Amino acid sequence: MGVQVRSLKELDVADYDAVVVGSGFAGAVVARELAERAGKRVLIVEKRAHIGGNMYDELDESGILVHRYGPHIFHTNDKRAFEYIRRFTEWRDYEHEVLADWYGTYMPVPFNKNSMEIVYGEEKAARLIDKLIETFGDERKVTINELRAQDDPELSEIADFIYKNVFLYYTQKQWGLTPEEVDPSVTARVPVFVSRDNRYFQDAYQGMPADGYTAVFENMLDHELIDVCLETEAESVFDLEFESDDENAPLCAISIKDVAITGPIVYTGPLDELFLSRFGRLPYRSLDFVYETHDADHVLPCGTVNFTVTEDYTRITEFKYLTGQDHPKTTIMKEYSHSYDDPKTQIPYYAIINEENAAHYDRYLKLTSGLDNFHPLGRLAEYRYYNMDVIIGRALALADELVGEE
């Protein structure tokens, strides 16, 4: 059957039992669950010209499968989330590795025993590794703060090296911060991994969809009770009704084409944009991607290289490592981070989480408090950072709640 893409103009909104805004994992999982488990007819409103949200991938001009909105590597300890995504795809075993480019020398990230040998040489590294094991134990992740708390200058030296050469410049580029603005609580979490495990993630379940993420969403949304309206902005089709004219008055109803939506509304977009930024826009970081295709099997030694001390871009990803694609050429992608200034031309990727912004978000969230059927879900709607598996887990939990209300 395939995904049923429809025009909102041709639909009778009264025919639907639920409305979902967005077709990334948050929206797609809930839509599938409501259709499959509760027999609800679901309308998905998607502002982009494709399904899948930021997980969308496609073949580039050379036939290389690329992730259009940055690399996505699935990893989780949540067995339910893992088993769920496997329903909709064949699975490819893949364990991601990341190297830092340290002035032209590659070293594993997170910083580990192998990194120490590269930086300090085998003899000094062996001494430092013995100290780490004696102090903290083997196969442990130890934070910079834990290292600095020890009365040993060599352990402090490791912490200082990692801060300056792995963390600081990369974080400045990623978040647009000066060294003074880098939050100490973030610095504190930067680890040394007392291990020779070069994997970026140590989760129990790791891998990649064999046919790409877009195929996952095509299969997930392939259901007779799900219709998808692409290139349709919620803020342009939702008619919002408030309890009063006060700008802080909460919603009391949402309609589409003069039909009040009384069933579940699952909203996964930016909450400030739904309310036309009446309190000002929530700040995010955005990204630009520059692709290069090379006549070579590979140009990087692994899937991702972080540029922690040089370059304007934060990292380069080579997709063939992630996808396992067999192709005589290869495509890499350079990633540039910058402020989110124009919703019409840019995409919000990362919420800038601090007390001021959280209070700003809460002001928008309170506008939804009068609608029991309105459910904000996901990175943008909740102004949080979530990995894919957490989003799937949260979407399944919401679906459990909504199905249980029947």
Image (cartoon, rainbow, N blue to C red):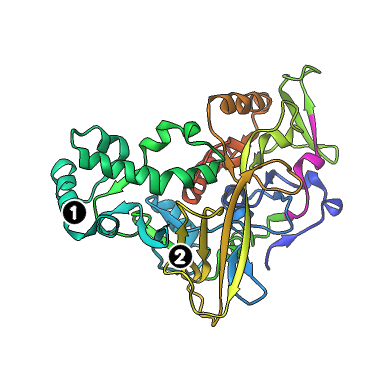
Horizontal relation, residue 375 to residue 307: left or right = right
Report, in whole angstroms, how far the alpha carbon at label 2 lies from the one at label 1: 29 Å
Tag 1, which secondary structure?
helix
User: For the C terminus, which image quadrant?
Assistant: top right
- The numbered mark, 2 or 1, whose residue comes first in the sequence reads 1
Toward the viewer: 105 or 207?
105
- Kind of residue sitting beneath label 2: Gly
The residue lying at 68 percent from left, 24 percent from top is 370
> Where are the magenta residues, as a range?
228-240
Tag 2, which secondary structure?
loop
Q: Residues within 10 Å of mark 2 (few under 14, many from 20)?
A: many
> Which mark is on residue 124?
1
Toward the viewer: 95 or 210?
95
Residue 236 belongs to the span the image colors magenta: yes
User: For the N terminus, which image quadrant?
Assistant: bottom right
Q: Residues within 10 Å of mark 1 (few under 14, many from 20)?
A: few
Q: Which residue is mark 2?
A: 303
Toward the viewer: 191 or 6?
191
Can the viewer see residue 378 in this picture? no
Horizontal relation, residue 166 to residue 85: left or right = left
Toward the viewer: 210 or 177?
177
Relative to 396, residue 228 above or below: below
Coordinates of residue 401 in the picture (x, y in percent):
53, 38
